[in-house]
């Protein structure tokens, strides 16, 4: 409860300490005030215990003084004695006002009533004696004096009796009040000890409420120092400087976590890029090695083809010369640009050479068409991505069919994508076969002796690594003898046009 009060409003640490001091001081002062009030009340009661006895004693003294002054005046008849008499009677009358003047059931009050009645008679008789003395009535003042003296004796007797009665009652009250005072002292001591214990408990609770957030914050700091940034954040709501420090500390931890996360992701991306780069290099090296395996000495092959082309020109064999030239360009491209970035225009030129060679070998069995948007000629792509597809089309689609094979290449763009389609009218593919090719589980095209060794799986893998996307190739076929369409999907924004 106390901790909630401290946290209810936003206060600084100094304000909280002042509040603690005021709170404990208030409790201490309240305890002292209660003890002082009770003790003062009992003392007031003790002071009033014997007041009645004192008043009766003073009343008897006033009667005695009046009697003495009256006697002196009657004997000496001095003006000073008369003056003293009147002063003592006035004093006696003032004392009489403190006595009960009504009939009641209380014995002590009735005695006061009787004393007052006798005092009235006494004062009247004393005045008669003084007046008789002043009138030189010796017989009169003697009789009045005798009667006044007798009334004075009655008054003394009544006062003594009443005084004894009240003394007994007041003594009992005194003993009762004394016991009450002792009980108050005992209760005050118990209350004081209890308040000291309560103060200690309150101070302990308050100290815990103040120091607990600091302890939690120090534990968190130790965890951070040991390198543990995944601990649960402390939501401290104390409304003081500790809360501000805790929020700043939590922000620092979150910033460190975000930085570590960004650094980890950056390292993962960098590692993935390096792995993809190594895979890309391995695939390209594998493709290049397979081409090199088909040639014992490439330079010798080029020189031989050039010599054959020159010989055909000298013999006016134009078709032979063109064939040899296409062969030379095909092998030169394969060996020099198989592991480089090229343009779509370069890839289309290689397919032109390849189709020409195939038509020479197989007597023009292939009808080759191109529907190309020249705006995408300069888009850069990995080398050797179209020729392996066309080769696959020839080997498994239109070779040995009993009608003329058709190969159509289309290049067009939509939004931020460039699409390259290679379509044929050959044997077609089943859905199962398409799935196996796209999943990379078919290896038969690479084992064909007539193939250059770079199959659809190689092309698809290199495109995925090069562009960092999974959907790079689609294969569509309506079934047996319905032809096949291979569609390459290239993101235009990932690789800018050549020269930009």
Image (tube, rainbow, N blue to C red):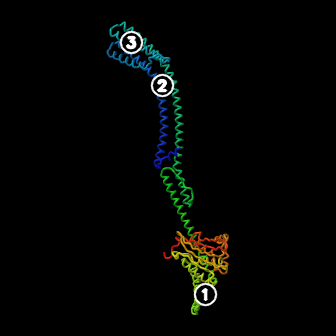
Within 10 Å of disc 2 (Cα), the crowding (few <14, some 14-19, many 20+) is: many
Return the x and y of residue 385 as percentages of the image width and height. Answer: 59, 76
Residue ID at (56%, 65%): 265
Return the x and y of residue 358 as percentages of the image width and height. Answer: 62, 82
Return the x and y of residue 246 as percentages of the image width and height. Answer: 51, 54
* Cα separation between marks 3 and 2: 33 Å
Q: Is residue 7 left or right of residue 86?
A: right
**Which structural element holds mark 2?**
loop
> For the residues carrying marks 3 and 1, which lies nearer the camera in this image?
1
> For the residues carrying marks 1 and 2, which lies nearer the camera in this image?
1
Label annotation for residue 21: none
Q: Is residue 325 left or right of residue 15?
A: right
Front position in the image: 111 or 149: 111
* Cα separation between marks 3 and 1: 171 Å
Report the residue marked by disc 2.
49
- Residue 278 in view here: no
Return the x and y of residue 397 as percentages of the image width and height. Answer: 65, 76
Mark 1–mark 2 CB contact (< 8 Å): no
Q: Residue furthest bottom?
A: 315
Label annotation for residue 301: 1
Mark 3–mark 1 CB contact (< 8 Å): no
**Which structural element holds mark 1?**
helix
Q: Is residue 316 left or right of residue 432?
A: left
Report the residue marked by disc 3.
124
Residue ID at (51%, 25%): 173
């Amino acid at each position: 409860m106390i901790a909630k009060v401290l946290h209810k409003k936003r206060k600084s640490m100094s304000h909280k300490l002042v509040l603690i001091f005021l709170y404990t001081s208030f409790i201490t002062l309240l305890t002292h005030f209660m003890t002082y009030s009770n003790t003062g009340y009992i003392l007031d009661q003790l002071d009033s215990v014997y007041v009645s006895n004192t008043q009766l004693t003073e009343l008897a003294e006033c009667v005695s003084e009046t009697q003495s002054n009256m006697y002196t005046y009657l004997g000496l008849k001095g003006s000073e004695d008369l003056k003293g008499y009147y002063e003592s009677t006035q004093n006696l009358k003032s004392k009489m006002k403190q006595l009960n003047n009504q009939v009641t059931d209380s014995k002590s009050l009735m005695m006061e009533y009787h004393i007052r009645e006798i005092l009235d008679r006494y004062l009247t008789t004393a005045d008669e004696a003084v007046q008789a003395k002043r009138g030189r009535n010796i017989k009169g003042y003697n009789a009045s004096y005798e009667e006044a003296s007798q009334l004075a004796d009655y008054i003394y007797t009544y006062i003594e009796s009443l005084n004894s009665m009240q003394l007994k009652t007041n003594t009992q009250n005194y003993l009762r009040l004394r016991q009450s005072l002792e009980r108050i002292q005992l209760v005050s001591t118990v209350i004081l000890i209890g308040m000291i214990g309560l103060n200690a408990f309150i101070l302990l609770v308050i100290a815990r409420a103040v120091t607990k957030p600091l302890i939690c914050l120090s534990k968190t700091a130790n965890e951070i120092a040991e390198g543990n940034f995944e601990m649960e954040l402390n939501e401290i709501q104390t409304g003081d400087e500790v809360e501000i420090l805790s929020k700043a500390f939590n922000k620092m931890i979150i910033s460190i976590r975000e930085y570590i996360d960004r650094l980890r992701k950056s390292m993962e991306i960098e590692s993935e890029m390096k792995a993809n780069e190594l895979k890309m290099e391995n695939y390209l090296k594998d493709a290049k090695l397979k081409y090199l395996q088909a040639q014992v000495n490439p330079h010798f092959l080029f020189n031989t083809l050039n010599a054959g082309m020159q010989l055909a020109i000298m013999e006016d064999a134009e078709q032979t010369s063109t064939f040899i030239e296409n062969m030379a360009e095909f092998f030169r491209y394969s060996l020099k640009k198989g592991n480089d970035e090229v343009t779509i225009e370069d890839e289309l030129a290689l397919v032109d050479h390849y189709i020409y060679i195939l038509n020479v070998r197989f007597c023009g069995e292939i009808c080759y068409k191109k529907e190309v948007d020249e705006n995408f000629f300069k888009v850069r792509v990995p080398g050797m991505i179209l020729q392996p597809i066309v080769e696959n089309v020839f080997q498994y689609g239109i070779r040995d069919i009993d009608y003329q094979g058709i190969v159509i290449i289309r290049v067009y763009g939509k939004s931020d994508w460039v699409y390259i389609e290679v379509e044929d009218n050959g044997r077609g593919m089943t859905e199962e076969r398409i799935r196996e090719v796209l999943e990379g589980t078919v290896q038969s095209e690479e084992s064909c002796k007539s193939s250059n060794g770079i199959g659809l799986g190689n092309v698809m893998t290199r495109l995925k690594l090069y562009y960092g996307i999974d959907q790079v190739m689609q294969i569509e076929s309506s079934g047996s003898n319905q032809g096949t369409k291979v569609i390459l999907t290239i993101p235009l924004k990932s690789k800018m046009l050549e020269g930009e």
